Amino acid sequence: MTTAEGITLEGIGFNALGGSVVLLCSFLFFGLAVRNRNTNIAPRCAARNPNVIFNPDSKLPSEDQVNGDNNVISSQLSKEEIQYKGSAYFGWIPWCLNLSYDAMIKGIPGTGTRNGGMGGHLLKVNLDAIILIRFHEMCLKITCLATVLCLFLILPLNITARCYYDMDLDECSVTAGNRKLTNFERTTAYNIQPIRDDKNRFVNASFSSGLGRLYAIVIVSWILVFYALKLISREWVENLSLRRVFYLESSHWENRNEELEETWLNQSCVLNESSQNLSHCSSKKCDQDYSKKNKRDAWIPHPEQRDTLPNIDIYSVLVGRLPSSPLEVDADLEASIVARENPDAWRLETAYSFFDKCVPPENGFSSSVAAITILPDAPKLALAWRKWYRHADLLRKYIFLEELLDEKRGYTIEDVNEEPSGVQGKSSSLNSTLAYYDDIYGHGKFPGVMDFGPEQTAIYSREYAQGAAACCPYGCGEERLRISKIDDIEIEIEETKELLKESEIDWMDAMHKAAMNEANKNKDLHIDLRDKTTFKNEEQENQFKDSQEGNNNNFRRRANTNMSNISEQSQQWEDHVHNVGEYNVLGFKEKSFKVFSGSWTLPSVKSIKEATEKKFSSMWKWATDKTKKVVKDIHQETTFAVVTFTSRRAAVMARRCLLDGKGLNRWAPIKDIPVPPLADAASCDLKTCRGCCRPVTLTIGRREQQIRKVLIYFVLLIMFIFYTFPITAVAALADPEKLYALWPQLQKLENNVLFKRFLSGFIPALLFTLFFALCPAIFKTIANSGSNARSVQEAENKALQYFWYFMLVTAFTGSSLGTMTLNAINEKKIENSTFTTVLLEIAGTLPTQVSSTWLNWIIFRTTITLPLHYMLQINSFLFECLGWKCCQRCVRGGGPGGQFPYRILVDSGIVLLCTFSLAPLCPLLSLAALIYFLYCLPLWRRNAIFIYRPKFDSGGSRWPFVADICVSSLLVGQILITAVMFLKKSYGPGIMATLPILPIIYHHRETRKRYLDSFLDTALFQTCKLDGLNGKTLSSGEDREEYLKFLIDAHKAAYIPICIACSGKDALKTMTKCQLRTERQEMKDEVNDESTESHFQNDEFVLHPDKAVSFDSPTSTQPSQTYIEISNENC
């Protein structure tokens, strides 16, 4: 906000001085929190050893013990040397900057879950965070160059311009408001007077005239543009390579096995559920006693569980518009009977067979499909989630009451049932393992959770902990129960038992309804082909019978290799007639059309009469049925399925190829990689808290999707047009006259210099920060409700796009347009302003008003917002001091750390935009931008390690839009600099400023054309060497079996909600189908003279969870084991 005297350096300096005090205090309190190893500044370390945060006994390693690149730690370093992070106050900055990308992705030494942080699961950073870090590094390089050019070239030219010295110039006096320029305005391009001589508006050798100074500004913008384009090209190459190596072409199965060897498999024993005996003991592998481990809060998941799933999404494809009846596929009579009796099982079997035929098996597998899942009905799933969380709440309360009762008694049941000393040694390792599993599952085991593999267990652990993040995790009246007597606690336990039984029944009922997918049962699925009423007319029935007979006749004719060329040609026309007839039936046309042979005949009077009567008779039926059909189309849901293949090559073929060439709009694959978690919130469901924070399910009908998209575009249009009114109205409150009217007591401070500087610097920045703080939540809600996103990752990317373009429009036009509109309304007149005059008005405020506003905003964000909110996590400390534990867990993302805020990219993009567009006009802004990125670079590295816990891993998929942010910033910057040049009546610099626009657009187009397809998905040539297709990795049958178990477990964890994953074979058999056998197992059956078994034993369409990863033949006497189990032959 500007005052009548104009913006001064003192006002901006007051803002910077106050922010510097806050910054220093933040570093002081942050250092104290690090020394005390407080988990508020490191939520991801809540269940880890405190030495991971800060080791007070750490010491600096000697130079000869550290490798030359300062990244690879020597194996000779001690624990204290590995965990050395410098001083608690500022030592984290060089420690974070010395970490390489490879170390952050694979695991940071000294941050593990075992042995004081030296072993177990290490803290890691995924590629999404790496892209954010690299973006800030690129911005830092650009701002360094901009600072040098602007401070040492542009600033002296601006200060020595003539407007400051010669106020008698008409142009200077008019633009300055008939006053002398302030010291801040003297540093900007506002100090350069417009060109008065029409003959010297292109070339003038004298810098004193101002034309040379404007050319210098344009040249600086040129240098920044071409340097930025060079960096963007380099980032495309490096980010593409990172995505290929660590995501698209990474050895996910091998890497996951190495992780499990350090955590899950590194146990003292393994319990064989078949024999219930202790087996495969290896006590030397276990490095801690889990039964004596410190108790973990219910809202903190086990630290050895992965934050995100292995990248099963690159093995999968999302397919929509699955057929709903045999009329839509080449089905025989037997298939139609199956569809009538069990339509969901028929749909699942049809989808499995379809993809098995589309993509042939390879690499020793009997099928190319590892698992396939039909997405459940969203409203039923929302009900199942509510019942699941309700049951989890009661389970936590019951466990809390039992532990409280043991504490009151002074002993536990385990102490009473302690085994004799002679037997204790045999079961000590077993108890340790059971305690470890209890620690993972939070001592609250839902039915079937012990049958989960590692990936499903990780999802269960996170969801169970997330349910405890709300208010009263142990039930209402926790403090009252703690002071209750033993008898009262026992009564409460019995009441909770009864409630648990009821809640389990309700949850099981809702779970089975969601898993059975009852919403997809419509009348079209119950089809008996023997009843002609299932067809719309008799003509369709005849055409369908002819198509079925044609299939058999075509097969017989094509099997005859002695067929003559004449019969082949005649058969081709019959095939054409058959295809059209099949389309009439499968396409569900209201009126089937006949094949035109090409021979014209004159219509008869009788045929014309019959056609006219038929047309008029159908008009009334069309009018009455149209409304019902529209309503049905809006609410009709689309069936989607997720298919996971045995190789990435099969998956990319299914994603990128046309699956069905009949033109029926069926079997439509989504070309994007299906990054879990998928969108699963029910439409208009406000009762489920989980659904309010997730995107609407992708199974809603196409008509509803179109309606939602139109509505959000309308909402966005309203926001983009009328956003200036609240901003301008709120910003006007900082005007002294407005404040004096609201609070007359402030008029006493009218002559106070500090108060004026406070109003001109701090208050506008604070108002802008508060307004833009609400934008991320608003755009996230819009993206979840109407962007038609297919996953949580895609919805967040949509919100990022909406927020960025909103800021792009508002950043430099908001204040001017808002002021002009409000003035016109107040004066009851609208000025006849064209687009050119509006643009010139905006450009006139760039060097002073807009520049000062965003300069104050950058200073405020660098010195106050970043240190308080992002470094110190002040909200967590405030809620902890107030005793609001629920709010504290909320700001910590439920307790173990929240997701990386997507607004960070937008805020940094705005600073980069200011660098391109405002720094050449206001050189001091480049210095503020440089300080901002200098602080952000180590801050985001540390936060990615210790604070933010990712919810998905998209392999850095945001980089293409990050590149769009950079390019759009370049374009807007050049356009606005061009406007300023023309406003100064300098046509030569103005034309010169427009020249980089075409190279920017061309560069952006060519880089996307060259790299984007390779960035989005993997390629066939590269995948031919992956997943054992080269014959090296999966050389044995055992390896293929273990690899298949990993795919199935990861598929279930990614695409089957955990609230229905425990339902077992009876519920899941119509929802998920998995491959059971490999060619090796079929060969074993042939050797044993047994008949070859189908993919699914006992005609079931899904594996029971306890057999979901069992691949031994039925004749095998060895107990089935999951791939989480390990055997030690030397035991």
Image (spheres, helix red, strand yellow):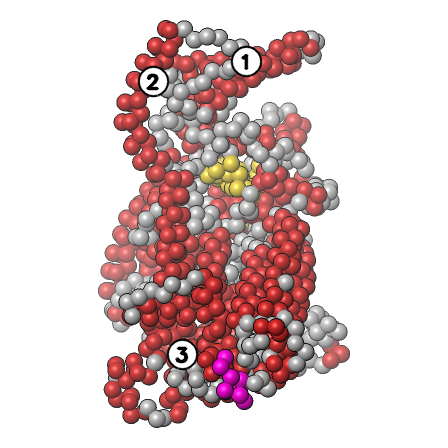
Q: Nearer the viewer, residue 422 or 219?
A: 219
At numbered mark 2, what does the secondary structure look like: helix, strand or loop?
helix
Q: Identify the magenta region.
A: 163-171
Placement of 970 over or under 863, stated as above or below: above
The residue singled out by tag 2 in the image is 615
Which badge, 2 or 3, comes first in the chain's sequence?
A: 3
- Which residue lies under the disc numbered 1? 598
Identify the mark nearer the N-term, 1 or 2. 1
Q: For the N terminus, which image quadrant?
A: bottom left
Q: Residue at x 39, y 8 (%)?
A: 607
Q: What element does badge 1 sit on?
A: loop
Q: Is residue 692 magenta?
A: no
- Whether residues under marks 1 and 2 lie with C-beta atoms below 8 angstroms apart, the answer is no
Q: Position of residue 538 (x, y in %)?
A: 39, 13
Q: According to the image, label 3 marks what residue?
A: 1
The numbered mark, 3 or 1, whose residue comes first in the sequence reads 3
Q: Main secondary structure of the magenta part?
A: loop
Residue 490: quadrant of the picture:
bottom left
The image position of residue 653, as x and y in percent, is 62, 38
